[in-house]
Image (cartoon, rainbow, N blue to C red):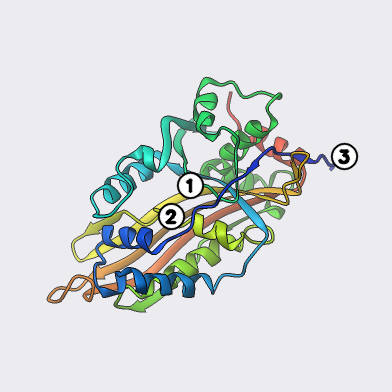
Amino acid sequence: MGFTPTRLQFNIEKAAPVSLTPANLRVQLNSIGFTCEHTFEPALEKYIGEGLAKVKAGSSFLVAILSPKESVVRRAAALSGVAGSAIKSVNDIAFADNTIKVKTYDGRVEEYYLERVNGSYRFPNAANIPHILAEGDVSEWDPTLLKFEMLSVIMAAANFDKLRQDDFNDFNLRSAHEKPTESINATDVNTIKEVLAKLVVLTTSLVLNGLTIDDVQSTLVSRFAFKDTSGRNFSIVDRMITLWANNPKPDGSVDALGAINCNWAINGENRPGSKKSAGTQLTNFNVETRSVVYTDENFLNNDYNHVKTP
């Protein structure tokens, strides 16, 4: 492409990934209306194990999760009302003192929260990132935060789609946009393990070398907690952007860096005349994923400059 490949400088630190526990999954399921014996913790421990067994273990690491402000607010409200939930406010899910505002090439602004959940790696002083970005202090002297900002801008749906439409610098060779729909035919909460497994497989398969199992679990903590009901029909909906890194080195560089913007809806129907859980029919599972992989800093810089706004 006319330039020398540049290594990706990305200074992150080791962290303790948050596990998906039976207690956390029970709270999530209770918040969306599943309360039968299948949601008791001994059963859920078995379901988590069976669901994760369907996922091929990888070697890339979760660094951060960004979620739309409105999504975090709705999840916090849903989870705070469930017995045994550790979530009492938005601040228990995300660093909510400042939103991260992402501009799209056509002049719109999207607001995200940086979630508190840790993968195997994290940004040093993660709590300060929203404040730093809000103040506009990101500069060349902080290459890690600069890349965080660049990836956030690139992964906004409108910006990503423009890069794909323009196929800027062969953007389509390092990115993917998929909209699979999975049919579901089941009437009890046991199906959640299948849905979780499908969601994880569809998203983590887009990560170079896949995510570690520990990091896969981190993406599912306090994730399913908003049920949009319309009469007999309902949707369990959410959206998130995950940032990941491959082979972090002691010198502060990585072999690859990437992100996935994932939207999904688990759709179903509440059958009248029976217990709520037994009368719940899951019908289909819609996912839309946008993903990109960078192994060269030049491509990241150029993609960002193509869609950034003044």
Residue 168 point in image, percent of width and height: 70, 43
Q: Residue 298 carries which label?
A: none
The residue singled out by tag 1 in the image is: 117
- Quadrant (top left, top right, bottom left, bottom right) of the N terminus: top right
The residue singled out by tag 3 in the image is: 4
Vertical order, 155 against 50 (above or below):
above
Residue 119 point in image, percent of width and height: 56, 50
Decide if residue 137 is on the left or right side of residue 143: left
Q: Which amino acid does label 3 sit on?
A: Thr
Residue 79 point in image, percent of width and height: 29, 50
- Quadrant (top left, top right, bottom left, bottom right) of the C terminus: top right
The residue singled out by tag 2 in the image is: 221
Q: Do the residues labelled 1 and 2 touch (CB within 8 Å)?
A: yes
Mark closer to the chain start, 3 or 1: 3
Vertical order, 54 against 256 (above or below):
below
CA gap, disc 1 and disc 2: 8 Å
Q: Which amino acid does label 2 sit on?
A: Val
Q: At 48% from the left edge and 64% from the top edge, which residue is drawn?
A: 199
Number of residues whose C-alpha sits closer than 10 Å to that of mark 2, classed few (under 14), some (14–19) or many (20 or more): some
Mark closer to the chain start, 3 or 2: 3
Decide if residue 172 is on the left or right side of residue 228: right
Number of residues whose C-alpha sits closer than 10 Å to that of mark 3, classed few (under 14), some (14–19) or many (20 or more): few
Quarter of the image where one finds residue 23: bottom left
Residue 191 point in image, percent of width and height: 37, 74
Q: Which element carries disc 2, helix, strand or loop?
A: loop
Residue 152 versus residue 61: which sits nearer the camera?
61
Q: At 15% from the left edge and 76% from the top edge, which residue is drawn?
A: 274
CA gap, disc 3 and disc 2: 41 Å
